[in-house]
Structure formats: C-alpha cells, structure tokens
Image: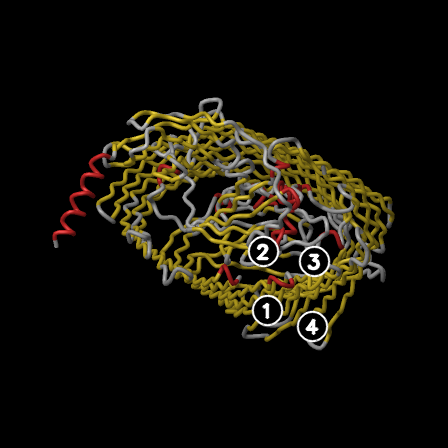
Amino acid sequence: MRRFLILMMLACLCNCTFAQSVVTGIVRDTIGTALEGVIVRVNADKATLGFARTSENGTYKITLKSDAKQLIVTAEAIGYEKTKREIKNVSQECNFNLKEKATDLKEVVVKAPAIYQRGDTLSYNLVSYIGKNDYTLKDAMKKLPGIEVGDKGSIKYLGKEISNFYINGMDLLGGRYNIATTNIPASFVNSVQVLSNHQAVKANKDVFSDNVAINVNMSNKAKFKPVGSYGVSLGAGKHTLYEINGAGMLFKSNFQMLASLKAGNINQFALTDGTNHFDNKETLSTLSNLLENISASTPPIEVDRYASPTDRLLSFNILRKIRKDVTLKGNIGYSYAKSQYDYSLTRSYADADNNVIIAQEYSPLSTIHRPSIQLEYKDNSEKTYLSNTLSSTGSFLTSELPTKENGSLFNQKQTMREFYVNNKFSTLWHHKDLCWAVTSIMSYQGSPMGKITLNKETTDNVVQNANGRSFRTENTLSMSKKHLYSRIYLPILLNYYMDKVQTSLHPTDESNDVNMQNLRMALVPQYEYSHPQYKYVFRLEIPMRIDYIIHKDNLESASSGSWYYSVCPSVYCNYKVTSRSVLRTNIFYARTFGDILDFLKTPVRFNDTSLKVGSGILADNKSLNASLHYDYKIPLKMWFFNADFLYNQEKNNLLMSQDASSTLITMSKIYAPNTGRSFMGQVGVTKFIEPIKTKISLNGGYQWKRQTTLQNDNQQKYTWKSWAFSPYLTSQPCKYVELAYNGMFAKTYLSTKYQNNSYLSQQHKVSLKLMPFDGFTFDTSADIVKNELTKDVSKTMSLFDMGLSYRKKAMKISFDIRNILNQRQYAYTIYNSVNTFTYNYLLRGRECVCTVKLTM
C-alpha cells in the first residue's frame, strides 16, 4: 500500500512538469485559398503528440501535453508538397501555405458502376450501356433500363413523360430536346440522370412534385472547348440522294450553345426535331382544326419508308448565366419540309341497309415553312422566382393532292398561312409565412389565309376560303400558407378568350362570319397534406368556375350569351409504399365546352368528299376521370416495373353525325345527349443484364371504348377494343456482336348492331451488327409486317437493309443498301367509329447511300 502511494505521488509530480500547449492556424494554397481536409501533425522526438484535419475554412486546432522544448508541425495533403515548421512548445498560431505538386500515378483501371442512386436521383453511366458503334444520345438512351424513347423523340421514365430536360443542370432547349438527343454524340456524355419528384422552381423546394426530369452530364472534352459532329451522305435510288449535317456545341459552367444545320432528301427530320414536348398548348389553330391538312395521312411505319422528303433545318440555341441563379436564353429555329408519296384508300361507311364505299388514289405533295423564336429571362433563386418567356412561331403550308377516282384524275390544292405570338410571365415570392404567386399568359394567333381549291371535271370548281384570329389571356393570383405538414392554396383565375372565323364557299356563296368570347372567373381552393419525408401526399382541390360565353353571327346580326357554373373537384394521392415502389392515383371531374366551330351554320368544304357543318349549339362535355399508377424498381439490380390504368366516362349534349353517300360525306353534330366510356390499361417490365449488355422490355396494353354515333339517320352504339403486346431487346453478348429486336402484336375489334369485325397485325424489326475486325462493322436489319386487311385476307411486307462501316478515331465511313428486295407496297386496315378504312401505300424502292461522319 505504501509503495502504491509513493508511485502515485511520483506520477503526479511528473505530470505537473508537462506543459499544455494549444497550436492553431490556417492552411492555404499559394494564392490564398483555404484548403479543407489537410492533415496537420505535431511531433516531438519522433513521437506524434497530436493531429487534426482542417475544416471547410482551412482552420485547425491541436491541444497537446509535452515537456519537449521544440515541436515539429507538419501539414500534408494529396496534390500538395509536404511542409514542416519547427516551433517552441508554447501556445501559438502556426499557418501554412502549401505549394501544388505534380504526382505521377501508376496506370490503374477504375470501373464506375453502371447505375447508382442517391436520394431521388438515378444516374446511368452511359458507357456501360452502349457499344463500339457511333451512337447519338437518342440511340444510347433507348438502351437505358426504365427509360423509353418514342418514335418522335419523346422521353418517358416508368411510363411518365419527363417535365424538364437539362444539360449540365441548365435548361438550354426546354421541350425541344430532340435537337440535343439527335445531335449530341453519345461519346460526349458521361452520365444521364433521372430526377424523380423534381421541383423545377427552387423557391418551391419544400412543395411535393411527382414530375420527372432528365439531366445530361457532358464529358470534360465537351465542357471546356467547342465540339461538334458533322456528316455528308450521297446515294442513289429513284433519284439522287444527299444529306449534309453539322452540329457545333459548347457547354461551360456559365454558358451553353448548340447550333445545328441539316439539309437532305434521305430522311425526314425538319418537323420532328423541332417538336416541343412540354408545351401542351402548342396545338393547331382554330382554322387548322377546321380545314385540317389534305396531305396529313400517315401509316404506322417509318415515314422514310414511303415518303420522299426534302428537308432543311436550322437551329441556334444559346444560354448565358449572368448571375448564380439568373439566366438569359435564346432559341431560333427554321424548318422546311417537303414531302411526296403515293397511296390508295378504300373507305367503307356502314349503316343499317348497306355499306357506302369510296375508293380513291392519292399522290400528296406538301411544303411547309416553319420559323420560330423564343427569348427567356429567368431568376430561379431559393427565395424568389421570376420568369418571362416570349415566343413566336409561323407556319406556311402549301399542299397539292392529285386524286384518281373511277379512272378520272383531278387535283386538290391547299394554302395555309398562320402565325402565333405568346408571352408568359410568372413570379413567386415569400412574405412572412405566406407564399404569393402571379402568372400571366397572353397569346395572339392569326390565320390570315386558308384556301382549298377542288378542280373536278364532273362538277364546277370549288373554292373554300377561310381566315381567323384569336386572342387569349390567362391570369392567376395565388396565395398559399403552410402549417406543420399541411398547406392551403387559394388561387384566383381571370381568363379571357376571343375567336373569330370567316369562311366563304364558291360557287354556292355560302358564308360564315362568327366571333365568340369567353370570360372565365374561378376560385380554386386546394388542401394538401404531406408526410415529413413525403411517404404519402394527399391533395383535395375544388375549382369553382363561372363562364360567360357569348357568340355573334355577323351575317345575321344576331348574338346570344349564357352563364355557366361549374364545380369540378379532384382528389390526388401519392403513396410511397416502400423505398422502391410508388402508388399514385388521381380522380377528377371535368367540364369542357366546344369552340367557335360549333356555330358555323353553313357548310365548310375541306376535301373533295367531305364537308363540315356546325350545330349552332355550344358543345358541353362533362367527364369523370380516374387514373392509377404503380411502379416498382430495384435500380442496382436494374429491374423496373410500371403499370397504368385509366377510366373515363363522358356525358355530351351533342352527338356526332355523318351522312354518307358515294360522292360526299357530311359531318355535323346534333342535339342528342349521350354517354361514352373508355378504359385503358398498360403494363411494362424492363430488366438489364450487365455482363452481356442486354436490355429486355415487355410491354402490354388493353383499350376499350364504347360510344354512340349517328350515320345516315341510324343511331348506332359501337364497341371498340384492342390489345397489344410489344417485346423489345437490345444486346451485346460479346464485343464482336450486337443485336436488337422490336416487335408488336395487336388485335383490334369493332362491334356494332350490324357488324362484328376484327383484324390482327404484327410488326417485327430485327437488326444484327458484327464487328469481326477493329474498326469494321457489318450490319443487317429486317422489317417484317403482317396485317389482316379483311377477314381471311392478310398482307405481308418484308424490308431488308444492309451496311458496312469503318471507323478510325474521329471519322466513320459507311455504305448502306436499303430495301434490298425492292418491296413496293404496304397495306393495313383501321377502324374509325363504325367505319372501316383500308390503306395501301407505295414504298420507296432500293437505295444505296454512302456516308462520312466526323466527330471532334
């Protein structure tokens, strides 16, 4: 016991001799920037007395006890030279300035995961999905599991359309993202990100959204210098074939630019590349809905198989970030599309007594010019949001439709001139515990000229003239307040719509001169409850709307107006069943009205066999809609599943009516309350097998519709239904082979009191690429289509293509032969209401094309 006490006293005396020191300081680089994560150590006599790691602002603090008179302080970090300082053992400040150093690393192979998820962001490492061939971004995205790219370039994730498209986090193109996906080489892209529950407005970051966005992260070689892709194609077929294209781009942290120029007569691209996938209101004008397009018939195959196009496209897009959250954007585009093809059409109009059959052959030739411009200013900060977008589009259409009927040939011509101007202003700000938002949209659409001329030997020449204009303004003032996990919205809407249409038909001199105005006021209270982690979100909305609609017939100097009151509730629920699955449902009641075309009381001719007549009564449609969506995904195992079910029930006050004869089809509406129902179900499952780079997708769908129509004074209820199954596969089982398959099996039924018809259709597209030697690729593909035209009568079409290409660094040379067997016809049947239409298209013959591409 005594020995123990003595030892304790000696230890205490020894400790009392140790000096306690505190060493602090800041570590910077040679230009004065604070360095985070630097290791600072204090040594004495080769013993480590303490160490620390610098914080975000470069500071550190080390407390130590030692009887050493001198201390060695060392600072070291990867990429910087190790620095030492000798100091006295007293509390003091010791700062460092580290010099950068170059380090030669041994060659290593780092393989990034093909897919990974962080929160609501799913990232695809693009190189893990594509092969050696020269893919565009669009082609590469088709291989990503869970993502679907449509024929016109639209992008879906788990069956849902995307709401935003970003390049390096910036919105350069908006809804016209086809320009990016078709021009950016896949080799310029590091990763593609899917942003689920994306909230585009930062000031609303705490507001739940079920939107999905895509963000494309460019590689370093496309971030710091101008890059581009360029190509030239020459070929021979029915006539000389050519195409030239070039796209230059630059993607920096505060500046983005993408310019493209394309011209050729091999593929049709001018109109599809400029499609705006986000603007739902970018629809046809009232005049276009009236006169339609006499050359707009298209079969369900690639347009380049049957149409001979001459297209030109110019697109210039620029975005400048002038401050952290403030951007200026300009988009200028011009599309020129000329197309010619040949087809025949047999129309069968069924009634109680017999079928009226009209058979004709057409050779449509159409030309359209479409310039567009868009200017946008946006301040998207976390406290406020301010955006103003000014856009304008023009459309100049000329169509000729040479028509052959019963051995006689005549011509139909159409001319349309239209322009559209739109300005959208939107702002949002927070004041105390309230959030205020203001949105104002103003648009003007002018259609100064619409003309259809029919030159038929058996009748007098027919000339249908029409013009129109419309003005629309939609204004919303909204206030919202959040309390705990609940939020209440009180938007007030004030909208005004004005339409005017004039028509004249010669030689009958039948005319229309009608204008219509709609003043709409609405209060749209909404309640929302959100789980703290958004496990479930519930919304209840009860729009209360007043419409005052007035129309005037200027020829009769008569006008009338009516008030309409509507309450259209809706319920929305989003439930995150697990971290991998989501269940979403939406049930709503809607009421919509017709348009000015309802008040055109005299006939309007829009082709040689068809004319329209308004009912003089405003259409009033009431509908109940219900949708259910479910998706389940295991991203790391690359399993994706989605299912959608939609039900719709409509009550209409007007009934579609057709009077069909062997020479003329008259379409109108009569007052006859009727009900229609429809149901649609769709299921899709996708699996990606990484070792063999194989994506397998299976999609199935079912549609059912029951409607009522009036034809030749016979009211008929008809049931239309169809089912479809679509398998899709793309695979690279080894580095020498790549194959793809896209199929479709569909069965369609039409049932009425007087007929029961059905037809089966199949489509198979198979492609095989062989890469036996470095740089060489041999590819072959086949399109096989089998359609049932009538009962026990089917037609099969087979198209075969073949090509050989060689790639050396940035250059690729290819030679392709299309439609090797010189297949010349494609036929199919569709049901339209109670009527049956059978088409037969002439196809482009055998063609040979040589192409040179340069990517730099």
Q: Which residue: 47% across, 39% down?
A: 553
| Mark 1 surroundings: few (<14), some (14-19) or many (≥20) residues within 10 A | some
| Mark 3 surroundings: few (<14), some (14-19) or many (≥20) residues within 10 A | few
Rounded to the nearest whole Å, what is the CA distance between mark 3 and mark 4?
20 Å
Residue where numbered disc 1 is placed = 725
Of the residues shown, which amino acid type is indicated by label 1? Phe
Q: Which residue: 36% across, 42% down?
A: 205
User: Judging from the image, what secondary structure is the residue with disc 1 in?
Assistant: strand
| Mark linked to residue 364 | none
* 380 relative position to 255: left or right: left
| Pointers 3 and 4 in contact (C-beta within 8 Å) | no
| Mark linked to residue 790 | 4
Rounded to the nearest whole Å, what is the CA distance between mark 4 and mark 2?
39 Å
Q: Is residue 720 visible?
A: yes
Rounded to the nearest whole Å, what is the CA distance between mark 1 and mark 2?
20 Å
| Pointers 3 and 2 in contact (C-beta within 8 Å) | no
| Mark linked to residue 144 | 2
Looking at marks 3 and 4 on the same chain, the residue that comes earlier in the sequence is marked by: 3
Rounded to the nearest whole Å, what is the CA distance between mark 3 and mark 2?
24 Å
